[in-house]
Amino acid sequence: MRRSDPDTFGPLAVDFMFRSSCPDPMRGGVVRSLAFPVESLPPPLCGLLGEFRLLVNRSIRIALRKDMRSRSRLAKAAYHTLSTEHDIYKQYIPSAFEVALAVLKAHRRRLRRGRRTSVPFVKRPLLKAENQSYRFDRGTGRLRIPIRGTEGVQLILPLSDWHRRFLADPSWGLGSLTVTTDRIIVVVRKIAPEPYEPTAAIALDTNEASVDGVAVGDGEAGLVSLPFPEVRVVQATHFRRRRRLARKKAHDRRVMRCLLAREGRRERNRIRQRLHRVSKPLVAAAEERRAAIVLEDLTLHGAGGRSRRMNRRLSSWPRGELHRQIEYKAALAGVPVIKVNPAWTSKTCPACGARRRDRVGKDFVCLVCDWEMDRQHNAALNILKTALASNEALARAVRFQPGALRHDVVSPLYDLPAREGAREEPSGVESQQTGTISSPHV
Ligand SMILES: [Zn+2]
């Protein structure tokens, strides 16, 4: 399937020094990663990965010593030395600078937050190449990676139907290429359409087994719920499996680690697939209504430190993954997404604005007025109110009175569509619930 042979490449097309100062037209675009697992790489490519890792680590040390944060400054200080000392395709050197600066940025962020951190270095061999450095045939999957001079390797990447969907669509351009010892990642990117001016809004509170919220627009408002109860079932199943594995393989840590990692990958894939069944129809429903989607910003935490609720949210992978899916699908469809600070959303009365400082149970009950609503929808009303307060255009388009929703019955935002293309799971993982009828009190 794969072979490596010497290959000839054209002249260097771009002078990176000039390129780095040009605005990137792809910014504000959407990127997807097409991943291809590989069992083994041809030896010259392995050598290149090791060399690239060295380059990155040397660049990190140089940039750290002189406190450099821009690629052009790092290039001026280090390009000449590194290019004479490392015999590789020259365009990889600025890519190594980019990786080094990204690693350093994360390192500085950790320092700023007061976390202990040692001088960073890249442990695993890797290669990152910009799109002008490699050649990829989108029809056949033939990938040519230069090593040095006229030497290069050639691989055939096995294209699945999913890969072909992106590669056959010329509006997706090729981005960077990343090679590690066990996978090759080709990034594709697309310029997102301008988001439309919303005339409606769907505000959602993201919970463990559902997103719950309110849809407003066109003079009507309603409480909605999008359940995904299977995610919890998948998580519970895999939790049990992992515990059993850990017990059985306790005598061999290496095997255990490997098997646990595989379990983790399977679990994530299963959950991802279920979340797609929420994010896809949600974005379609928003597009149909010309609505903005309003979500909590999971990277913010409210005033007064992190609450127990926020801690749990930040550590929860499926929430972030669901938001990621909603955001990129919305960007591709031109659906505006507004993110608001989730501080106090579960403890504020949307009718009178009073706050409760104690723990809120299943239902939010206001101590000042007589407002009462289940906690999750109550949070969503506050999320919507926050968005309207900070977004004038949306506030002009959407009129919203929480009182009108008081006795509203919760309805599904859409009927879940047929599971086109979704792979069936082995029995025992699937929950019995279909998820079309929602009740926030379950
Ligand atoms: Zn109140």
Image (cartoon, helix red, strand yellow):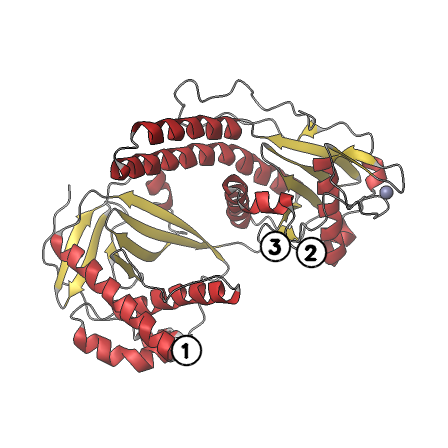
Q: Nearer the viewer, residue 61 or 212?
A: 61
Find residue 338 and report its horizontal and vertical position in percent: 64, 52
> Could you tell me residue 368's position as x and y percent?
89, 43
Could you tell me if residue 18 is visible in this image? no
Task: Write the residue at 29% across / 64% down.
Answer: 132
Q: Residues within 10 Å of mark 3 (few under 14, many from 20)?
A: some
* Quadrant holding the C terminus: top right
In 3D space, how far apart are the residues under numbered discs 1 and 2 (Cα atoms)?
33 Å
Quadrant in the picture for residue 8 = bottom left
Residue 67 sits above or below residue 299 on the image: below
Residue under label 3: 300
Q: Report the front residue among 362 and 284.
A: 362
Instruction: Find numbered disc 1 in the image and state the secondary structure of the residue it sits on.
Output: loop
Residue 379 percent location from the top left of the image: 72, 41
Instruction: Mark 3 and mark 2 in contact? Answer it, CB < 8 Å.
Output: no
Tell me the quarter of the image containing the N terminus. top left
Residue underneath mark 2: 304
